[in-house]
Image (cartoon, helix red, strand yellow):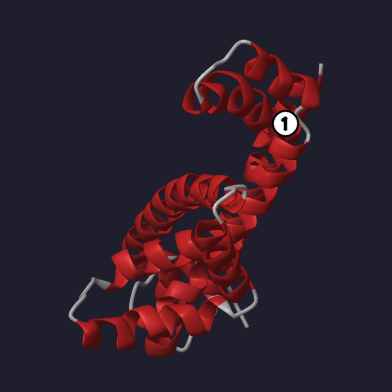
Amino acid sequence: MNWDWDVVSDFMPRFWDGVLVTLQALALGSLVAFTLGLVWAIAQRSHQKWISWPVTAVTEFIRNTPLLVQLFFLFYVVPEMGISMSALTTGIVGLGLHYSTYTAEVYRAGIDGVPVGQWEAATALSLPRRHTWTSVILPQAIRRVVPALGNYVVAMLKDSPMIAVIGAFEMLGEARAFSNETFTFEAYTVVGVAFILIAYPASLLIRALERRLVQ
């Protein structure tokens, strides 16, 4: 097969559309995952069993079911309950919800890594529980887990093509549709290179951040 630059040129407008969808899903999905993951982690540490047990059960269920199944459920079943979302919004929610269960474990490890003396000092100073979390525990815990959270951003990028199955055409979805229409292969190659160009610098940035935080 011969490489055809004209095919690449024809694909590029759809490629940039796919890039935009990919970056939106990645950025907003990461925001959902990081925020909700922290909520899960704190709720699991609650002394109220009626809070910690259901949260643990829900996060375990989500973590142990495939992302693809969750996307289908959100897109096809949830609207039957009266909650309708666009394909892209569903993809963002699905990615964020799925990865929030993993980031919750990362936060949990970071919180557990805070020395016991910090908790005892906050108690001795009679700090309110909310102040203890926001000013003492979380700043130390999050500093420890930033590199691990960054790894999940890269993992989410590699899972983003799954949202194409519900109609949110990111880079690979656009390449698949274009290739099926034109019977060419160049679009897949362009997208493969694009994933490398996005993921590899991100991984280098995460490593640099990790080295900086452990100093």
Relative placement, left or right, of 186 versus 211 is: left
Residue 115 seen in this snapshot:
no
- Position of residue 141 relative to residue 23, above or below, is above
Residue 60, position as x, y percentages in the image: 63, 70
Q: Give the residue type at disc 1.
A: Arg
Relative placement, left or right, of 157 versus 111 is: left
Residue 60 or 5: which is nearer the viewer? 60
Residue furthest to the top in view is: 125
Residue 77 or 30: which is nearer the viewer? 77
User: Where, quadrant-wise, is the N terminus in this rendering?
Assistant: bottom right
- Position of residue 120 relative to residue 61, above or below, is above
**Which residue is painted at 58% across and 64% down in the image?**
53
Quarter of the figure with residue 202: top right
Label 1 environment density (alpha carbons within 10 Å; few <14, some 14–19, many ≥20): many
Residue 65, position as x, y percentages in the image: 60, 80
Check disc 1 and report its element: helix, strand or loop: helix
Residue 107, position as x, y percentages in the image: 65, 43
Quarter of the figure with residue 56: bottom right
User: Where, quadrant-wise, is the C terminus in this rendering?
Assistant: top right
**Which residue is painted at 50% across and 52% down in the image?**
33
Residue 204, position as x, y percentages in the image: 72, 37
